[in-house]
Image (cartoon, grey):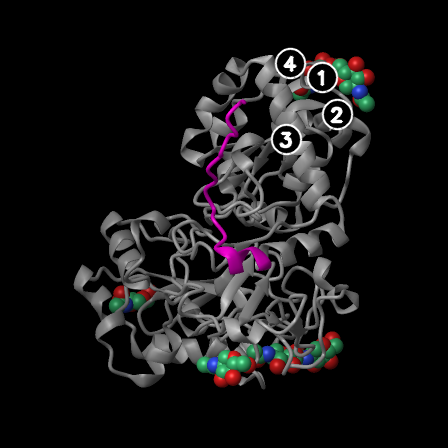
């Protein structure tokens, strides 16, 4: 069992040895993928410090095993995927060993990740692929198959009627919010909530309790240990993480708490109870706001990263139906593969970088400012459906075209998004350009006007975002309705 080259990350090393022990006792495996979280919180960098993929030779079954480290999103914990290729032919029933083993050590090691990824490494046979996939993640609903950010797990059924204590909120003029400072104080645009009139340091007076989940390692140990948790009653869990499953408590363990996050999905969202929030824009191109839709350089444009590999998140940016929108004239899709994790992956598997070099030349031909000078701004999901690009496009008076599946748009109980943006599922990207060309100028003007109004009223800076979040929380008291009905006043 030689060739294990991991200089630091002691936790990982121990874990791998442990796994190997399990391998030896299960040497009849034909193909095996084992996932286990690996604590790299010691590393500040965005890649595993000294861990590069290692190949292990298995003495017992003549297996060759590979450990590959990947993480599903920035800030997520690195997860080693171990796959073994055994030369000995074995029947497919041998695969069942994974399930039928009664060894408790084994149970501890083989752990289905919360969220499925398409098979990382699969040995020859199709049948192996299917069996492994089904074994690994039982009960994945159809909408989550192969789509990592279609978070398949569910939160407990809840609504304001049954999961909320209104009497806590009765005696104050203003919505009073208590924020726990440990383990994480309010983050991002919530960081100044402490100075706002909504904040209280007295838990007795609080109507709402905000819990910030985005800790560097899994939530220690569980929010239900918080002093005023009370089954999660009147608690709001706030997260900007790319995937709920990476660090947050098990979704079925959050009790009566509601979720305020960038990763809420239509299929798990509890309307009127959970709230979708945006990532704040990093660049605001307000100088472009005065350009009317038809006065702009491009019809639609995007310039950004591609995500390589067969993991679900954002990899659709590599699909032909995305790339082929680019015509070099009025529709620009300029992508780059040049990113740390991509580069590592390409070194290992050059074949996944197909078209990267060619795309890089297109990418070099455009600037960020260029692509914002566009009637429509393409906003494809990346590591998660929410993106910085969304607010950035809005800031420029550019009409967003979201490309995301199953996505609950931010503050959708306050903002009538259908009057501003367009949204397409990733399976319908081939329709986008045709639909955009058919939109009349009058409608373009109206959409741009609405988009700008929403940006200025709800999203334009941190203070506005925090206030909007509080407004969205307040809207729940009067039955936040995600679908709006317009009541027109009859002319006299
Ligand atoms: C964390 O990093 C420091 C400095 O590189 C090292 O001395 C320490 O052993 C590391 N701890 C773990 C748990 O890997
Ligand atoms: C991860 O390691 C750090 C020290 O390197 C430690 O403080 C932390 O508690 C560990 N987290 C888990 C979940 O083991
Ligand atoms: C494993 O490899 C050795 C040497 O290459 C060979 O003699 C042996 O038959 C192989 N065992 C199995 C189970 O394939
Ligand atoms: C609801 O809040 C009121 C006022 O704070 C309190 O008296 C009551 O015990 C709470 N109910 C529950 C179920 O926590
Ligand atoms: C935007 O594009 C239009 C049309 O090509 C051009 O006239 C205008 O100068 C551009 N504005 C900026 C700020 O780039
Ligand atoms: C880059 O732009 C130049 C000038 O407009 C053009 O001739 C060239 O074909 C473009 N290159 C690519 C790869 O699009």
Q: Is residue 224 visible?
A: no
Q: Is mark 1 within 8 Å of ligand 5?
A: yes
- Rendered view: 134 above or below 305: below
Tell me which residue sits at (33%, 78%) in the image.
107
Q: Secondary structure at mark 3?
A: helix
Q: Which of the 4 image quarters holds residue 29?
A: bottom left
Q: Is mark 2 within 8 Å of ligand 5?
A: yes
Q: Which mark is residue 329?
A: 4
N-terminal of the pair, mark 3 or mark 2, is 2
Q: Which residue is mark 3?
A: 450
The location of residue 13, given as percent across then percent down, is 55, 77
Q: CA distance from mark 1 to mark 2?
A: 8 Å
Q: Secondary structure at mark 2?
A: helix
Q: Secondary structure at mark 4?
A: loop
* Pointers 1 and 2 in contact (C-beta within 8 Å): yes
Q: Which mark is residue 297?
A: 1
N-terminal of the pair, mark 4 or mark 1, is 1
Q: Which residues are magenta?
A: 474-492
Q: Secondary structure at mark 1?
A: loop
The mark tally for this picture is: 4
N-terminal of the pair, mark 3 or mark 4, is 4
């Amino acid at each position: 069992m030689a060739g294990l080259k991991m200089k630091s990350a002691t936790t990982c090393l121990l874990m791998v040895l442990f796994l190997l022990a399990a391998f030896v006792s299960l040497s009849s495996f034909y193909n095996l993928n084992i996932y286990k979280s690996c604590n790299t919180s010691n590393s500040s960098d965005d890649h595993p410090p000294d861990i590069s993929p290692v190949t292990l030779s298995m003495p017992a079954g003549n297996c060759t095993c590979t450990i590959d480290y990947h993480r599903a999103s920035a800030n997520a914990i690195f997860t080693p995927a171990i796959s073994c290729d055994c030369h000995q032919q074995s029947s497919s029933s041998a695969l069942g060993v994974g399930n039928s083993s009664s060894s408790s050590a084994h149970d501890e090691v083989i752990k289905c990740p919360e969220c499925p990824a398409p098979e990382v490494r699969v040995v020859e046979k199709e049948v192996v692929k299917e069996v492994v996939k089904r074994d690994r993640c039982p009960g994945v609903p159809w909408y989550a198959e192969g789509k990592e950010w279609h978070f398949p797990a569910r939160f407990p059924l809840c609504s304001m009627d049954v999961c909320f204590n209104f009497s806590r909120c009765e005696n104050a003029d203003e919505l009073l919010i208590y924020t726990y400072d440990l383990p994480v104080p309010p983050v991002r645009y919530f960081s100044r909530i402490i100075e706002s009139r909504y904040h209280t340091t007295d838990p007795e007076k609080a109507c709402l309790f905000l819990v910030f989940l985005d800790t560097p390692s899994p939530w220690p140990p569980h929010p239900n240990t918080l002093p005023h948790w009370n089954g999660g009653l009147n608690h709001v869990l706030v997260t900007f993480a790319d995937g709920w499953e990476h660090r947050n408590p098990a979704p079925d363990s959050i009790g009566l708490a509601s979720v305020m996050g960038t990763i809420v999905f239509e299929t798990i969202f509890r309307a009127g109870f959970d709230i979708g929030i945006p990532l704040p824009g990093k660049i605001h191109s307000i100088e472009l706001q005065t350009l009317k839709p038809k006065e702009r350089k491009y019809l639609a444009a995007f310039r950004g990263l591609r995500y390589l590999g067969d993991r679900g998140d954002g990899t659709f940016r590599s699909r032909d139906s995305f790339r082929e929108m680019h015509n070099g004239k009025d529709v620009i899709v300029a992508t780059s593969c040049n990113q740390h994790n991509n580069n590592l992956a390409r070194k290992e598997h050059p074949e996944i970088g197909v078209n990267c070099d060619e795309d890089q030349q297109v990418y070099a031909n455009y600037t960020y400012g260029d692509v914002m000078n566009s009637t429509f701004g393409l906003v494809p999901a990346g590591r998660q459906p929410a993106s910085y690009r969304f607010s950035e496009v809005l800031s420029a008076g550019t009409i967003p075209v979201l490309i995301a599946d199953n996505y609950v748009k931010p503050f959708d109980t306050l903002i009538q998004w259908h009057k501003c943006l367009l949204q397409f599922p990733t399976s319908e990207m081939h329709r986008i350009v045709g639909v955009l060309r058919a939109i009349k100028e009058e409608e373009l003007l109206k959409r741009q006007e609405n988009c700008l109004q929403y940006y200025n009223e709800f999203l334009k800076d941190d203070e506005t975002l925090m206030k909007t979040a509080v407004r969205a929380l307040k809207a729940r008291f009067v039955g936040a309705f995600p679908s709006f009905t317009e009541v027109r006043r009859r002319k006299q």
